[in-house]
């Protein structure tokens, strides 16, 4: 079975490319020979039923799978043409360039300010207090959280509501000015209003960063993304423009999934 | 519809419900009883200690009026500032002067029951302020051990009678003895003090903490965060768990065999004692540290890694601060155990009779629990109260140490 890739995609501006990527957990093959180009300017959505490997694949893009001892990656993934799995790749720098937002909001148990300032601080991206303040303010504004927290920056980040925490995590990710932001079901733990805010935020960040979002919700994928990849049983079944995938899928399994027959 | 009764509204269900509630009440009553019993035992223990121990902070003293201006002893502040000042005063016959005035005031019989070292108390006063050599004053000087036990209604009949007579005259009294906290061990219960053992304990604990805490925490961090999970780390884990359960005297034998072979000149030194106790404390810190580190949610690590923190930064910026309260709890338990430990220290010679407080980490010393053990073994009845007093000092030390650790723990918990 070969992945169906829609032919009308421009492939010249790929920010990240995967070629024949397989991921193993011990002996179990979780991802089977996935090849995909992530465009610079668009939001790319990974959809698929639970356990299809979309989150696993997402985590290979900034090598977060390295923290799982039994995980092993084969194939080639490039960022701007550099193989990120080559032995000399600096993982710290890679993760500064490819940020990540997780399924469950995970702010550090520190103040709101320190949460956002942490990345710039450890990378030395801001000289002096004023510059750091400016970075924190800019990141919180971009994450749409500034108005809500500007008077209590020293309060604990964990005291915020779930939706605010998730936006704080997005602010934390964009504070180091990454090139790609990976989002692993960022709204699955949030209520519809908080979800709407995050989706607005994604729309605003679109164009500034390459964004890859894993989602369970097909409506969400349809709303926020311009590219959609459908995963099933560790394989990428179909990849194309979001409008094409949802209105005119070429594969029967994609059709079945988006019309709600399984998943 | 039929008149079917819902299963949660039947009388049987209500009976079961009542049973469930009474089980709950029973459980609460038992728990409360256990707490009350523990508090009662603690109160009895502390009350008993306090009542017995109060006497240990006092000492039976004879009131002796001494006119130093008539003694012919001359000394100025310059000579008294020198280290051999006591010898200077001794050479000028201070002991005889004290004996003379005691005989004058109390009679031959009572004066002979003045403690043999009583003149040293006068000497200490003179050294502190040489101007008293021109004045007459009443000095409270320690009675002999025999007279002291006579005062307590023990010992020979003559002594009891003498003590009774002197007490009636108002010259034999039991005074609060602040110097108990600044003297060291002695053969005479009237002359003993706890400072030697207390200082030995403090120095030993400093060595133990300085060794066991960093090594224990770093070992726990390495095992949890860095070490691959394989057969070797399993073996290390089992070994550490076993070490925590090894009887303490075995650690004493280890200290004797290893440390005292390497440093034979440091017998009885707090340095060796602290090293031995650190061996015993470290596994406790490692185990509690590993549990505390395990309890830090992985999402925090992921979050830090995802903004590009290096593994060391993840550990020191996030994992360690979050695990610190738990690590400190384990440290309190380990240090409290080390403070109360006697057996391993007997093995490395810290049960020696040490009559001067230790000067530093390498001078001979003893520690509080060993001092208590030694005093409880003494034949002289005067040591009974002193032993209780030493126990109170030990418990207070423990309280201060734990209080400090709990304060630190709460401070870190608040911060996060």
Image (cartoon, coloured by chain):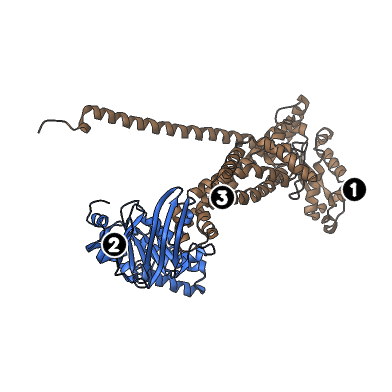
Gap between marks 1 and 2 measured at Cα:
101 Å
Give the class, few, some or many, for how many residues have Cα within 10 Å of label 2's Cα (few <14, many ≥20). Answer: many
Circle 1 — which element?
helix
Task: Say which chain tag 1 marks.
Answer: B
- Asked if the residue under mark 1 is in contact with the one under mark 3, i.e. CB atoms within 8 Å, the reply is no
Furthest-front residue in this view: A1
> In the image, is residue B308 above or below residue B280?
below
Q: Colour of chain B?
A: brown
Residue at 33%, 67% (x, y): give it: A43
Whichever of labels 3 and 1 marks the residue nearer the N terminus, that label is 1
Residue placed at 82% from the left, 56% from the top? Answer: B81
State the image coordinates of residue A79 (x, y, percent, origin top left): 44, 67
For mark 3, give the secondary structure: loop
Front one among A178 and B195: A178
Q: Secondary structure at mark 2?
A: helix
Would residue B140 be visible to someone looking at this image? no
Picture colour for chain A: blue
Q: Identify the residue position indicated by label 2 in the image.
A: A221
Q: Give whichever of B351, A254 is nearer the camera.
A: A254
Q: CA distance from mark 3 to mark 2?
A: 40 Å
Left or right: B96, with A29 as reference point: right
Label 1: few (<14), some or many (≥20) within 10 Å? few
- Dot 2 falls on which chain? A
How crowded pointer 3 is (Cα within 10 Å; few <14, some 14-19, many 20+) is rated as few
Report the residue marked by disc 3: B227
Q: Both on one chain, marks 3 and 1?
A: yes
Q: Report the disc number at residue B91.
A: 1
Relative placement, left or right, of B208 versus B75 is left
């Amino acid at each position: 079975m070969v992945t169906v890739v829609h032919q009308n995609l421009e492939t010249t501006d790929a920010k990240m490319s995967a070629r024949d990527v397989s991921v193993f957990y011990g002996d179990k093959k979780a991802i089977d020979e996935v090849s995909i180009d992530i465009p610079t300017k668009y939001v790319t959505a990974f959809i698929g039923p639970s356990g299809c490997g979309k989150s696993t694949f997402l985590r290979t893009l900034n090598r977060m799978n390295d923290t799982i001892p039994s995980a092993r990656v084969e194939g080639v993934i490039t960022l701007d043409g550099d193989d990120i799995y080559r032995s000399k790749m600096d993982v710290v720098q890679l993760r500064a360039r490819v940020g990540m937002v997780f399924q469950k909001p995970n702010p550090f148990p520190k103040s709101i300010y320190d949460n956002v300032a942490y990345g710039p601080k450890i990378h030395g991206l801001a000289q002096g207090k004023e510059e750091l303040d400016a970075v924190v303010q800019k990141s919180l504004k971009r994450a749409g959280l500034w108005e809500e927290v500007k008077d209590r920056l020293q309060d604990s980040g964990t005291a915020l509501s779930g939706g605010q925490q998730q936006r704080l995590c997005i602010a934390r990710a964009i504070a180091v000015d990454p090139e790609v932001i990976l989002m692993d079901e960022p709204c699955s733990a949030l209520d519809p209003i908080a979800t709407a805010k995050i989706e607005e935020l994604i729309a605003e960040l679109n164009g500034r960063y390459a964004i890859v979002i894993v989602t369970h919700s097909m409506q969400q994928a349809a709303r926020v993304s311009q590219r959609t990849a459908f995963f099933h049983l560790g394989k990428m079944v179909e990849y194309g423009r979001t409008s094409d995938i949802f209105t005119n899928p070429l594969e029967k399994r994609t059709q079945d999934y988006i019309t709600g027959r399984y998943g | 519809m039929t008149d079917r009764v819902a299963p949660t509204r039947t009388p049987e269900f209500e009976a079961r419900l009542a049973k469930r509630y009474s089980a709950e009440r029973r459980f609460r009553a038992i728990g409360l009883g256990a707490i009350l019993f523990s508090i009662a035992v603690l109160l009895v223990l502390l009350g008993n200690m306090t009542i017995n121990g109060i006497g240990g902070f006092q000492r039976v003293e004879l009131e002796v009026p001494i006119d130093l201006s008539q003694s012919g002893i001359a000394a100025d502040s310059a000579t008294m500032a020198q280290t051999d000042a006591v010898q200077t005063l001794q050479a000028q016959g201070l002991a005889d002067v004290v004996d003379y005035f005691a005989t004058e005031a109390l009679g031959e019989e009572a004066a002979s029951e003045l403690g043999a070292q009583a003149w040293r108390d006068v000497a200490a006063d003179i050294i502190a302020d040489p101007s008293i050599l021109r004045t007459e004053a009443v000095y409270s000087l320690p009675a002999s051990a025999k007279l002291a036990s006579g005062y307590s209604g023990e010992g020979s009949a003559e002594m009891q009678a003498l003590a009774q007579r002197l007490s009636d005259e108002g010259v034999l009294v039991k005074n609060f003895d602040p110097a108990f906290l600044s003297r060291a061990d002695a053969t005479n219960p009237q002359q003993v003090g706890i400072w030697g053992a207390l200082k030995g304990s403090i120095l030993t604990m400093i060595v133990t903490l300085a060794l066991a805490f960093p090594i224990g925490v770093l070992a726990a961090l390495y095992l949890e965060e860095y070490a691959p999970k394989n057969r070797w780390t399993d073996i290390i884990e089992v070994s550490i768990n076993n070490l925590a359960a090894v009887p303490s005297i075995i650690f004493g034998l280890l200290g004797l065999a290893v440390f005292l072979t390497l440093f034979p000149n440091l017998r009885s030194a707090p340095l060796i004692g602290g090293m031995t106790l650190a061996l015993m404390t470290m596994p406790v810190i490692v185990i509690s540290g590993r549990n505390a580190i395990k309890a830090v949610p992985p999402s925090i690590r992921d979050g830090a890694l995802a903004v590009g923190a290096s593994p060391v930064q993840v550990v020191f910026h996030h994992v360690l601060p979050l695990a610190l309260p738990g690590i400190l709890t384990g440290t309190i338990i380990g240090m409290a155990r080390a403070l109360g430990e006697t057996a391993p220290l007997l093995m490395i010679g810290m049960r020696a009779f040490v009559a001067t407080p230790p000067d530093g980490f390498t001078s001979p010393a003893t520690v509080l629990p060993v001092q208590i053990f030694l005093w409880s073994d003494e034949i002289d009845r005067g040591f009974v109260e002193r032993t209780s007093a030493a126990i109170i000092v030990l418990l207070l030390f423990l309280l201060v140490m734990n209080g400090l650790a709990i304060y630190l723990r709460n401070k870190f918990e608040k911060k996060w």
